[in-house]
Image: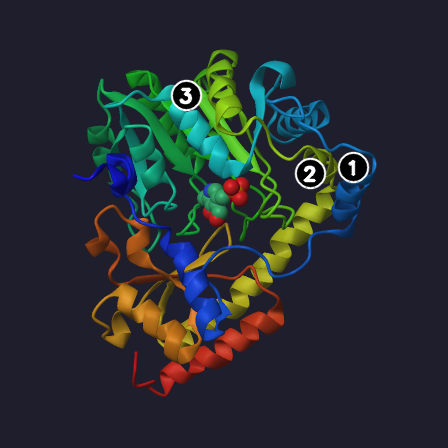
Amino acid sequence: MSKLTGSKKATQFTESVIREMTRLNHLYGGVNLSQGFPDFPAPDAIKAAACEAINGDVNQYAVTWGARPLREAVAREFTRRYGLPIVADEQVTVCCGTTEAMMATMMAIIDPGDEVVIFEPFYENYGPDAILCGASPRFVRLREPGWSYDPAELERAFSNRTKAIVINTPNNPTGKVFTREELSHVATLCRKWDVVAVTDEIYEHILYDGAEHVPLASLEGMRERTVTISGVSKTYSVTGWRIGYCLAPPTLTSAIRKVHDFLTVGAPAPLQEAAAVALESSPSYYAKLADNYRERRDYLLPALEAAGFRTFKPRGAYYIMTDISAFGAPDDVSFARSLVSSVGVAAVPGSSFYADPGAGRRRLRFHFARRRETLEAAVERLNRLKAGAPTV
Ligand SMILES: Cc1ncc(COP(=O)(O)O)c(C=O)c1O
């Protein structure tokens, strides 16, 4: 093979389908319900804090593992919310988004050939993350309508070769919120097989219908083997700031910090200052955030049903996974392409969340981090499907 084609690793995964749908959406001038970022502004106080930091000359590298005010705010907030003591100096690392925190963590703990258990459907980054660090993924299926897993299947996925398990709760793309019982089962397996749990908790504040967010690290015997990852992108509507962080036991933290340092040196310094201010938001901010998203969910869900999609009601995060069987399309990718080109709504083909694309052929994911008027414009277009839009 020519040396000019890129590494073997890089040929094992495709470009992000989610971001490709965003590009197609631009091309056709559609309403973008594919890539999950808000189209409404970030809170004024947080934006002001960022401007203040830049004007106050916080414009050089921050400490590579994160500016002290942010690390301390992360530790303080986690302890306040979940009751787990965290030492900012030894356990918190600030990264360029949750994305980098996940990559740095996987590179820090995984050796080529190690197995990593991943629930599927999964947030698409975990596939390439596993490939880039040489991990062999073991997928365990979440099954609709409740997206529960078969305990025996999870147990079969663990062995002496298992190094880590990735848990994303609240979950993208399903909206599943793992229950305390499920997490206790995962914890038992992690302890039995001496496995590191890596959790992606970026939607920890976006919960509905009384769902409770339980950090795996807070369960017995898990704080010493869990890397808890989160960030400010979704909670404060600042996905472009690229600020995320992980909380880990000290030994894992030092491995993660080394990888992080050589990957990126550090996250944007002035935005770290502003993120520290964001983390001081009042409880009413978080309640309102979840409430606003619940209203959007409750608007979009029946509209999708009325347009012909079967929906699975999310209990957290801001996505709705749907079943497109009623449309009789050949597969999810062609359906998504024609939905954006002829109806003008971009969504994500379900196959991008499965290792075996066949498993997602009847699925399409919509997100609802949009202004009400954007959602209304999308619904108006989706209503054309009812009339049997010929090209879909
Ligand atoms: C589950 C999950 N993790 C991570 C990310 C990316 O987070 P960040 O912006 O902090 O890199 C997303 C974005 O959609 C996500 O859905």
Where is residue 78? Give x, y as percent.
Answer: 62, 28
The amino acid beneath tag 1 is Ala
| Alpha carbon distance from label 2 to label 1 | 8 Å
What numbered label is drawn on residue 53? 1
| Alpha carbon distance from label 3 to label 2 | 25 Å
In percent of the image, x 72 and y 36: which residue is there? 270
Tell which circle, 3 or 2, labels the residue nearer the N-terminal end: 3
Task: Name the residue carrying label 3.
Answer: 108
In percent of the image, x 49 and y 31: which residue is there? 101
Q: Which quarter of the figure is the C terminus placed in?
A: bottom left
Local crowd size for mark 1, using a 10 Å CA cut-off: few (<14), some (14–19), many (≥20): some
Where is residue 35? Give x, y as percent.
Answer: 47, 57
| Alpha carbon distance from label 3 to label 1 | 31 Å
Give residue 196's quadrant in the image.
top left
Give residue 60's quadrant in the image.
top right
Where is residue 279? Give x, y as percent.
Answer: 69, 36
Question: Residue furthest toward the left?
Answer: 1
Q: Seen in the image, is 383 located left or right of residue 337?
A: right
- Between 142 and 71, the one lying in front of the other is 71
State whether residue 170 appears in this view: no
Q: Seen in the image, is 79 located left or right of residue 253?
A: right
Task: Name the residue carrying label 2.
Answer: 271
Tell which circle, 2 or 1, labels the residue nearer the N-terminal end: 1
**SS of the residue at dot 3?**
helix
The amino acid beneath tag 2 is Leu
Q: Could you tell me if the residues under marks 2 and 1 are in contact, i.e. CB atoms within 8 Å?
A: yes
